[in-house]
């Protein structure tokens, strides 16, 4: 069994300018890997720069081949450089240039919450999956806002604060298990697992760290550019810029306090597994 403690140094090493994201991803990937990912041919829906899935794949046993899709050409170019994928395609999830029933599984890690019209994506993923193929999804849940600490000042407007978080994170959907079950069923996918992760302490450690990293940069740019655009402008989004492992280990020790607390609900996120009917 792998833990978030095991993974946090690796994420801090790979993403030195995103320590808050490292906390979130360490918990998320531990939940995903411990559940297990099928062997065979997999589609990485919204693969981004490919580093995240490379870290996931390195923790797994068995044989898998990956195809990555993302609508951002710059991210796809970086994903190709990882050497993980047999093919990387510039494409949106609602129109996949892939054969029907040609994948054993699909993975979407912290992607679907950003897509306004999700139904075409779910139908397309169902189409390319083989019978009994699995779709593994990680997303913020309907408890995300509840798990946050909120504004630092007691008299500040919490609703305004939450709207600002949503804009910065580009979150559109916060669905609970029942909504996901219904939406997946409409696409011919049966929900077989809905497991919560990222408890209140872990969520608030992410929140605190992000105030002084991505949140600060977002404020300095007056909210006119998304974090990924800011990272590119400042030269932060570059696979060659990684932390030495000893420094990443030290950073992990400083940031990992919340990973020991296990305070329980509310949990901010859901790991979902759906099977093609």
Image (cartoon, rainbow, N blue to C red):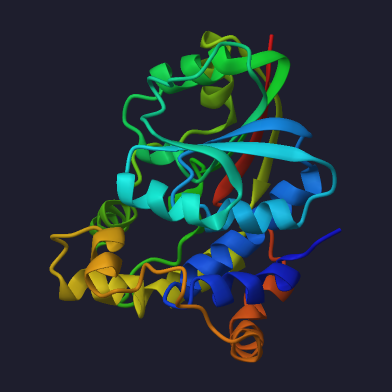
**Residue at the spot x=63%, y=17% of the render?**
102
Residue 149, how many percent across, how many down? Answer: 45, 67
Looking at the image, residue 176 sits to the left or right of residue 61; the answer is left
In the rendered image, the vertical position of residue 98 relative to residue 18, given as above or below: above
255 sits to left or right of 124: right
Q: Based on the displayed image, in which of its 4 quarters is residue 228 positioned?
A: bottom left
**Picture layout, residue 42 above or below residue 27:** above
**Residue at 38% from the left image edge and 19% from the top image edge:** 95
Residue 107 in view in this figure: yes
Q: Quadrant of the N terminus?
A: bottom right
Labels in figure, total: 0
Task: Depth check: give the residue in front, 59 or 137.
Answer: 59
Q: Is residue 139 left or right of residue 134?
A: left
Provide residue 231's location: percent of width, then percent of height.
Answer: 30, 68
Q: Does residue 156 appear in this view?
A: no
Snapshot quadrant of residue 10? bottom right
Residue plotted at (60% across, 84% down): 248
Q: Position of residue 77 (x, y in %)?
A: 39, 51
Q: Nearer the viewer, residue 72 or 255?
A: 72
* Residue closest to the eye, 44 or 18: 44
The image position of residue 161, as x and y in percent, is 28, 61
- Quarter of the image that includes the C terminus: top right
| Rendered image quadrant of residue 201 | bottom right
């Amino acid at each position: 069994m792998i833990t978030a403690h095991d993974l946090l140094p690796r994420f801090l090493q790979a993403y030195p300018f995103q320590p808050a994201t490292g906390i979130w991803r360490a918990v998320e990937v531990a939940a995903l890997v411990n559940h297990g990912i099928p062997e065979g041919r997999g589609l990485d829906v919204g693969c981004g720069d490919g580093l995240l899935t490379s870290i996931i794949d390195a923790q797994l046993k068995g044989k898998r081949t990956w195809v990555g899709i993302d609508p951002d050409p710059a991210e796809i170019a970086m994903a190709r450089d990882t050497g993980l994928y047999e093919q990387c395609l510039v494409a949106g999830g609602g129109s996949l240039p892939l054969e029907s029933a040609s994948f054993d599984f699909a993975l979407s890690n912290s992607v679907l919450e950003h897509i306004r019209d999700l139904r075409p994506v779910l139908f397309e993923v169902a189409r390319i999956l083989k019978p009994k193929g699995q779709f593994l999804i990680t997303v913020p849940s309907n408890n995300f806002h509840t798990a946050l600490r909120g504004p630092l000042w007691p008299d500040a407007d919490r609703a305004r604060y939450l709207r600002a978080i949503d804009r910065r994170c580009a979150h559109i959907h916060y669905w609970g298990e029942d909504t996901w079950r219904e939406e997946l069923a409409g696409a011919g996918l049966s929900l077989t697992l809905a497991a919560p992760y990222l408890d209140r302490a872990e969520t608030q450690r992410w929140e605190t760290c992000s105030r002084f990293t991505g949140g600060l940069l977002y404020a300095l740019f007056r909210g006119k550019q998304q974090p990924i655009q800011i990272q590119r402008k400042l030269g932060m989004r570059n696979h060659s810029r990684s932390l030495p492992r000893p420094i990443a280990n030290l950073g992990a020790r400083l940031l990992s306090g919340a990973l020991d607390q296990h305070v329980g609900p509310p949990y901010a996120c859901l790991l979902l597994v759906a099977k093609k009917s």
